[in-house]
Amino acid sequence: MKKFFAIIAILGVCALGLSNVVMAQAAAEPEMVQQIEGGFHQELKIKFIEGSPFFMSFVAMALIFGLAFCLERIIYLNLAETNVDKLLKSIEEALERGDVEGAKEIARNTRGPIASIFYQGLSRIDQGIDIVEKSVVSYGGVQAGLLDKNLSWITLFITMAPSLGFLGTVIGMVQAFDKIQQVGDISPTVVAGGMKVALITTVGGLIVALILQLFYNYILSKVEAILNRMEDASISLLDMVIKYNLKFKK
């Protein structure tokens, strides 16, 4: 986890550095926007500059940090997936032989929250079905919390991105009205600059929020799928423990 936050910090520094470079280029070469032609990345660069590099850099940072947390969750959830059918079959075969230690070893050597829950339950198999059930439920709650970890950060950046865009919109409108006050004219030429900043920052913030929302919903679907498998597998484990007790604890 320390490495993950270190990566996020590096990305943030890179984003700030990039925004400073773009701002410097925009200040030193105002005619650059007219000279750059063709290419999606070039058009994106133009809009970034036209939307005010200062405000657009914050929108870009929201995208970078949000994607970093999304990537961390996707990797974690992929590693949390387990072949539940194979795990259940192996543990069931071990319990039918009365080999509790073998079943615990199978669970210990299998990655994922389901195997961890199984290990906690099997570790208390001699204490009765009620204790096993309480252990499974309690540790299942712990694993569910780990699955939901960092999701609040993703929702934060989903909310921040359009808010930052709207902030740029308000600033752009203020700039437009300042120009109107200075010039004493409400012609389109006078207010075009401020209006462009307002519209581009809003569009940028909304696009970032949409991108992060797609990743967020994908992550939620994976979390729900894992939680459902955890519940089904836990019920199956309790059934196997009951059969084991009936067979070997008479």
Image: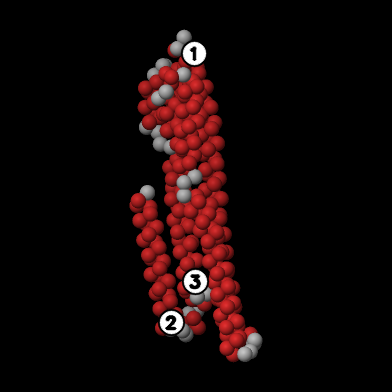
Q: Which residue is mark 3?
A: 55
Under mark 1, the amino acid is: Leu
Q: Which residue is mark 1?
A: 246
The residue at the point 53 percent across, 63 percent down is 161
Q: Is residue 171 above or below residue 73?
A: below
Q: Tell me where residue 45 appears, x and y as whole percent.
A: 48, 73
Q: CA distance from mark 3 to mark 2?
A: 15 Å
**Which label lies toward us, 1 or 3?**
3
Q: Tell me where residue 237 appears, x and y as whole percent.
A: 49, 25
**Which label lies toward us, 3 or 2?**
3
Direction from residue 156 to residue 116 in the image, left or right: left
Label 1: element kind: helix
Q: Are marks 3 and 2 in contact (CB under 8 Å)?
A: no
Which colour scheme appears in the figure?
Answer: secondary structure
Q: Are marks 1 and 3 in contact (CB under 8 Å)?
A: no
Give the quadrant of residue 28.
bottom left
Q: CA distance from mark 1 to mark 3?
A: 68 Å
Q: Which residue is mark 2?
A: 27
